[in-house]
Amino acid sequence: MKKVIAIVLYLLLALLMLAVLELNQNRVIGSVLIALCAAGVIVLRLTVLTDRPWYLKLSAVIGFIGSFAAILFLTWPPTRAVPATTQKNPSYTRTYSVAQGELRGVKLSDSVELFAGIPYAKPPVGELRWREPQDPEPWEGVLDADTFASMSMQPTNLPIYNSLAQIIGYHDYKISWSDNYVPPVSEDSLYLNIWRPAGEINEAPVLVFIHGGSLQTGQPWYADYSGEGLAREGVIVVNMGYRLGIFGFFASNELITESSHGTTGNYGLLDQIKALEWVRDNIAAFGGDPDNVTLAGESAGAACVSALCTSPLAKGLFRRVILESSTLAPVSPPHSFRPLDEALDAGQKTLDKYGCEDIDALRDLPAEKLAGEADTHHHITVDGYALTETPYAAYAAGRFNEAQILHGYNKSESAAFIMFDQANKKNYAGKVNSNFGAYAADILSLYPAGDNAAAKTAWAEIWGARFFDYSHYCLNRLAVAGGIPVYEYYFSKDNGRLGPWHSGEMVYFYGNIPADSKLYDARDRELSAQMTGYFINFIKTGDPNGAGLPRWEVNASSVDLMEFGSETHMIKERKTALYEIFDRIDGWPA
């Protein structure tokens, strides 16, 4: 009986080890070696160790665990750039000419071409760290744009963390039967990607997308950001990497003096402007219309779009905008923005932390050492160059760059952010009081909670409204006052994946629901077709409406929303009473 128990324990231990190797995306040989080790230790237990003392049997277990640790280390997934396509022998496109030279991309299908890793600025390394982006160098020969560039320098997680996020959050983890790899991170990340409809096209509408990630993390090649779905429908899609965290949003008085424009703190934003300038100068070579560019972003990317709408440097670089799950329209934006004096103070604290007397000393530090400072430096600021005033002040004065706006938020924006900080009947009132002080009583009267379920739901809605939803209400009012046609949505569709969580709408709008995924039902696919249709119409003309689609009314009253859920229909914003409290907190109008 003892032998049977021992064998079962060894097998369970081996299965746990195999699970760790799989979730960590180790090379397949690691799993093979663990299986061999498990077989060996079981044979050893059944033969040589049968009548041996307990400590020898324990040593076999310890040896097995030690072997696992060695295998985990030796078969760690390698670092490798992400290919533009998983095809083993991809077909290349014809050669295209841009200002820096000739290039060719890969054919994703008969209908879409992808050009990955096109430099739009010089690598911001060495002396160019914390300087405005410079024009890219020309190249010789034909550039094979078949590989995505490195992720911008940022804190990285163990692969096992990403796998668990796929299981817990996205519910779509799939076991891999081949070797995996870890994408690289680098300061050298100022590259863009272009998806275009295959064949000869002229003056096609262009969408430029800015990824999210709290201005700390993220990458443009994430599957939900793929431009393939929209390119199949005649839209050229561009996205880019930009500097993040301390590399993109560090501010210093010394850098102000050093800059010919007196700027600091907005290097990531300046990167995005540089990419837009590259699109203006080169997109016609791909059949795109530089005079019909729509700028879009999600989360922190939408905050960037909001800033670019009021940047004098971005004027004329795009015609209309799409903002998903964030804007900087409130008087006091709750995230992604801070006054210059706060940015300068944070910068000085970082210099002091590393014992650096000047900016050159900080420039000499390895990027990997500074990457952990991402959560200290991830805010846009009014630097007097990229931004000369807050987005609220600019809109209120009628100074903005876009002609039309499509924007909105999701039902469960807060779900991921408060997953481990949820409210219950006991702590609910305390959470509201600690966050809203003198205004807590008014909020509690709007959202009473008599049990744990009610407290959990109320806190989730209040938190999401404060950090995301309210900013869209503010944008509506500013846009309506400024005479900008504005179309707002509310995404509420549940599914087997993220549902209406933060970023859950993206695969619908961008036409990226996997054809074979069981996480989406027939209504999801119908809804995605509708949402993609609205998107494409707006990108082309500035009006999302078109044949076969329910009428999306322009938001002339600031409270009209198109709900994308079990049905597609117009509704009224229902949280205006809560928003009015936020107005009082922020001092709206300023």
Image: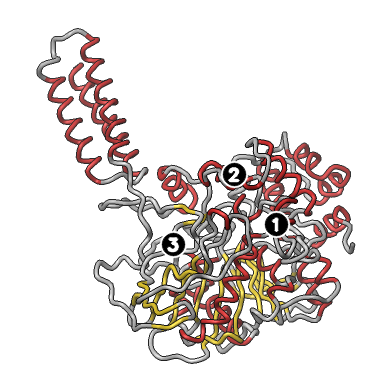
Ranked by sequence position, the earlier of labels 3 and 2 is: 3
SS of the residue under disc 3: loop
Q: Which residue is mark 1?
A: 258
**Among all residues in the image, which is located at the extreme left?**
47
Q: Could you tell whether 455 is left or right of 221 in the image?
A: right
Residue 197, picture quadrant:
bottom left
Q: Nearer the viewer, mark 2 or mark 1?
A: 1
Q: Position of residue 110 (x, y in %)?
A: 33, 82
Report the amino acid beneath label 3.
Ala
Residue drawn at the location 36% of the way across and 50% of the way down: 79
Note whether residue 524 is visible.
no
Q: Reply above or below: 375 against 56.
A: below
Residue drawn at the location 65% of the way across and 54% of the way down: 249
Residue placed most toward the observer, 482 or 292: 292
Q: Residues within 10 Å of mark 3 (few under 14, many from 20)?
A: many
Q: Which residue is mark 2?
A: 419
Q: Position of residue 525 (x, y in %)?
A: 46, 72
The tag on residue 171 is none
Residue drawn at the location 59% of the way across and 87% of the way down: 546
Q: Could you tell whether 29 is left or right of 365 in the image?
A: left
SS of the residue under disc 2: loop
Residue placed most toward the observer, 55 or 251: 251
Report the amino acid beneath label 2.
Met
Q: Reply above or below: 202 against 431.
A: below
SS of the residue under disc 1: helix
Residue 215, picture quadrant:
bottom right
- Location of the N terminus by quadrant is top left
